[in-house]
Amino acid sequence: MIPERYNPREAEPHWQRMWAQARVYETGNEPSAKPKYYVLEMFPYPSGRIHMGHVRNYAMGDVVARYHRAKGFDVLHPMGWDAFGLPAENASRASGASPAAWTYRNIAVMRGQLKSMGLSLDWSREVATCDPSYYKHQQRLFLDFLAAGLVDRRQARVNWDPVDMTVLANEQVVDGRGWRSGATVEQRELTQWFLRISLFSDELLAGLDTLERWPEKVRLMQRNWIGRSEGLSLRFALDGEPFGEATLEVYTTRPDTLYGAKFLAIAADHPLAALAAEREPALAAFIAEIRSLGTSVAAIEAAEKRGFDTGLKVAHPLDPDGLLPVYVANFVLMDYGTGAIFGCPAHDQRDLDFSRRYGLGATAVVCPEGTDPANFAIVEKAYDGEGRLINSRFLDGMTIAQAKEAVTATLEPRMLDGAPVAKRQVNYRLRDWGISRQRYWGCPIPIIHCAGCGAVPVPLADLPVVLPDDVSFDAPGNPLDRHPAWGQVPCPRCGEAARRETDTMDTFVDSSWYFLRFTDPWNEAEPTDEAAVARWMAVDQYIGGIEHAILHLLYARFFTRAMARTGHVPAAVAEPFAGLFTQGMVNHESYRDAAGAWVTPAEVRIEGSGEARHAFKLDGGAEVAIGPVEKMSKSHRNVVDPDAIIADYGADTARWFMLSDSPPERDVIWTEEGVQAAAKFTQRLWRLVGELAGLAAPPGMACPVTFGTEAAAVRKATHGALLAIGEDIEALRFNRAVSRVYDLSNRLSAAVGAIEAPDVPDDLRFAFREGVEVLVLIFAPMMPHLAESCWKTIGRDDLVARQPWPVGDPDLVKEDVITLPVQINGRKRADVTVRRDAGEAEVKAAVLALDAVMRALEGRPVRKLIVVPGRIVNVVV
RNA sequence: GCGGCCAUGGCGGAAUUGGUAGACGCGCUAGCUUGAGGUGCUAGUCGGGAGACCGGUGGAGGUUCGAGUCCUCUUGGCCGCACCA
């Protein structure tokens, strides 16, 4: 009988219905004796359709979820939508549909696509951040943060995106351009709401050390982003107290180089610069010029150190006779440290560049060990290495660390204008998080501005502040500002006419706590339920793209702490994500026609291979140039649509291919050959399982007492694969897990092929039953639909999705006799077969008796004989 | 500029974490089968050599009985931050 082909188009929807009916993937919050496991993939933005990156991300998460479910865990595996954001407004502007209608339509489409992937998600916990039932709680959190002092409202120079007409966080400015629009960012003064993440700088930094299951790369990026530095705040006496100012304060991490100071430099925005500019028009012009360059790409690339002498002088704190000039300089930042520095040209490259331009000199005060100070001169390159102090009076001969300590100890007790000259200070690069956005499609900030009472919180009973439906996008800027009625409300405190805050929150706020909401999404009264959070948090395995290494993950870590402080998260939950995995991208070849236009893979036919590989347009047959392999992107049109692949080959094939070959953290190249191979393998498994169904014992046969050679070999392969694949999945090495399935199917296939007699003995029939069940169960996390169909074929009438993970027996994998490689001088020259538990002496004797060893020795004596038990033997001649 | 990662057959990659380099897949070669909508099977596939054997993990050194794995230098590629005092 010719076995029928496996038809995923029929089987996949069938099993998806069966799973849904049996509600196998829904997880309640009622108490359970099982250990919990929370696996989460970064939730998608509902852009319209899922892409291959989603398929890869969710296939990985689903393997982890299904494996842990089989291992006996209570698994939480939810899904939702990061649904606020600019594209909805842009779509609205283009099509006229409201952002809400556009977003919910996209969610419906994408939910259907995710369901067609057969993911074991608990859809009963689905949330969308744009839904009032979600953002109501976010507004509550904002108000609680405000009451707890974690929110600030202040004037701030902000990054303004002139195309999107909105404020951007520092993190959203990439090379001086808006992360979304690509427009050159301008600086503007606006009143903004800030979340005071900088209060947690130290905690967020220290917490990184506890995140052992995070990639080192991500921890390092966050460490650098927080940017802790230890230094000294130093107050210089201003000569003659200009403008009534007695001192100028600078921040330095190198107080040891104080005797090398040649000048002070202040930022263009420094208050002293403004005062000096009032009496010096040329300085005012210089400041205006610096500001106009702002953070533009041109300014950063030019990177030329420029300054303007204010004419002010300060006294050197260790040399009262020495006066230093004060410059306004373009490379000094107002929002780091005190906005002022002292310049030591010999030991800082920027200071040296500046000094050389303005002829301020450079005195070396640190000399590398082993170099004669008399011959040590700084010309073009500043020296920032280790060494001993020179030209520094009482510091001479000290190491840098000793000199830092000596300067600090000398100046700390000294007073100047009623305050210590020096103060130890820790600085951070991390700034507070400006969350105000002048957009419609975001979470409204629940504040009412009253002329008499100021910024008044919306009473909790009035939440949510719901976005109005009737808005238009025919003018740039924020439609909420232009809405005739929405913003006009009475002040909750005095009852006078007042105005709603029309700014909405940065969408990164929405994604900073969704993983907490998933623990109890049904809770209408509170953002979270303490017991549910305690039960499910932390997320055991979080999976997503490396592009979120800093922003999203840092904000989520901050929110977890801020919510703990405001009573929404138990204090025991220190970190939100115990394990983090960042998966690679999905790449594809790109194609361009003769006119240079990008052509999609679906429009192309490939012929030949290697050098003779050519691509032709399906329509017309014209040859198209095969371009480099790069990230799938709309702009280069090198995208493959998951829907088309699932319709063609089935979800299991797409999932299997996404998990094959490339290690999950690395980029994978989507190829037609790869999909074909995956599709062929599904059919091969189907045929093999069909054959084994005819040869294997019925389910539940008692284990025979003894096994013959063939049956033992089958069992060895089965249990070997089972033990290995469990380790691979737990370590997220999906590519190796895939190769184990190939390997086991090859071995079972060979065993079937070796059968000669029509009567299969009982021991082998048992081994085949065990083998085929294990085979199906170990590929089930990756190809769950095929697994269900195979399970039925082998006479099981329950669901694979409900089966426990089988238990491997390590004893079956071991052999009674083992073959050890024998090296002579580190090179493999022979094999030796010994009993598994043979002692060292026995192994040595066996090795020395080998023909190959005697030949290789050629009568020379053995200098050393190393036996690594169970591994290898090395003969040193 | 500062910080980090990576380099293994024609290709994606594996290597029990210092112990037989190239598992598994793709591609390719040969043969058989099938015979028209994504076939299937068998054998081979790092290089040299008929062979025993010799060489081989970007390059050069080193540590070690033993190095793809550890150390130093070097070449190439990728990523993050970017005037942070």
Image (cartoon, rainbow, N blue to C red):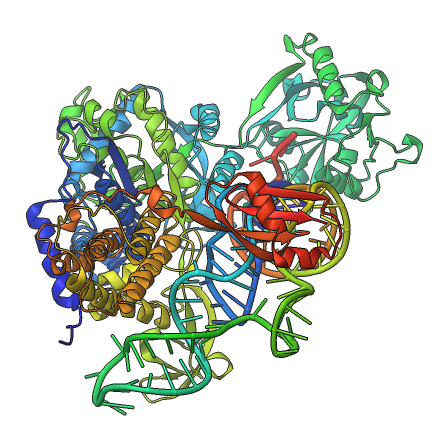
Identify the residue at horizontal 9%, vertical 55% (top origin). A17
Q: Is residue A55 above or below residue A373?
A: below
Q: Position of residue A303 (x, y in %)?
A: 65, 48
* Residue A670 located left or right of residue A332: left
Q: Position of residue A110 (x, y in %)?
A: 20, 56
Identify the residue at horizontal 76%, vertical 26% (top origin). A257
Q: How many marks?
A: 0
Q: Position of residue A873 (x, y in %)?
A: 59, 47
Q: Is residue A140 above or below residue A425?
A: below
* Residue B8 located left or right of residue A711: right
Q: Residue furthest left?
A: A21
* Residue A465 located left or right of residue A174: left
Q: Is residue A137 above or below residue A23?
A: above
User: Toward the viewer: A138 or A476?
Assistant: A138
Q: Residue furthest right?
A: A374
Which image quadrant is residue A416 in?
top right
* Residue A215 located left or right of residue A800: right
Quadrant location, the N terminus of chain A: bottom left
User: Toward the viewer: A167 or A536?
Assistant: A536
Tell me if I can see residue A672 in this picture.
yes
Identify the residue at horizontal 84%, vertical 38% (top origin). A378
Q: Is residue A174 above or below residue A263?
A: below
User: Toward the viewer: A334 or A725?
Assistant: A725
Q: Position of residue A105 (x, y in %)?
A: 16, 56
Tell me if I can see residue A51 in this picture.
no
User: Toward the viewer: A245 or A622?
Assistant: A622
